[in-house]
Image (cartoon, helix red, strand yellow):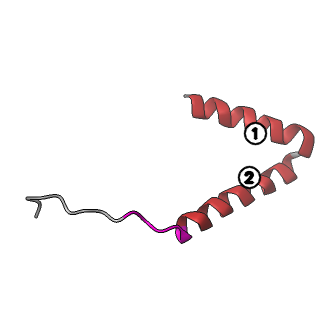
Amino acid sequence: MGGIFSGGVLGTLLLVPLGTGRALLVIAAAVLLLAVVGMVAPSPVKKPVPDSP
């Protein structure tokens, strides 16, 4: 619930000074950056669970 509210507030703060087009570009750039970081960052090593198939 808090995330939805925060997203609405941050979206409004972006839209008011920048306008719709630039705000969407900023959001798209942030999503692209997070996707690249997720692909490049090493995933944690998972240990096998004992007695699992």
Q: Which residue is mark 2?
A: 27
Q: Amino acid at mark 2?
A: Ile
Percent x, y of residue 1: 55, 28
Q: Which of the numbered marks, if any, corresponds to residue 11?
A: 1
Q: Residues within 10 Å of mark 2 (few under 14, many from 20)?
A: few
**Answer yes or no: do the residues labelled 2 and 1 have beta carbons within 8 Å?**
yes
Q: Position of residue 3 (x, y in %)?
A: 59, 34
Q: Main secondary structure of the magenta part?
A: loop
Question: Which residue does the image show at 59% across and 65% down from the upper left?
Answer: 37
> What percent of the width, then of the height, locates residue 34?
62, 59
State which quadrant residue 11 falls in: top right
Q: Residue furthest left?
A: 51
* 51 within the magenta span: no
Residue at point 71%, 56% (across, down): 30
The picture quadrant where one finds residue 9 is top right
Q: Earlier in the sequence, mark 2 or mark 1?
A: 1
Q: Is residue 19 left or right of residue 7?
A: right
Which of the 4 image quarters holds residue 35? Answer: bottom right
> What are the residue bounds of the magenta stretch?
39-44
Q: Residue at x 80, y 57 (%)?
A: 25
Q: Nearer the viewer, residue 24 or 53?
A: 53
- Quick one: SS at disc 2? helix
Q: Position of residue 31 (x, y in %)?
A: 66, 57
Task: Note whether 43 is above or below 1 in the view shown.
Answer: below
Q: Nearer the viewer, residue 34 or 22?
A: 34
In the shown orientation, is residue 23 left or right of residue 2?
right
Q: Quadrant of the C terminus?
A: bottom left
Relative to 5, is 26 above or below? below
Placement of 14 over or under 52, stated as above or below: above
Compute the Cα span from label 2 to label 1.
9 Å
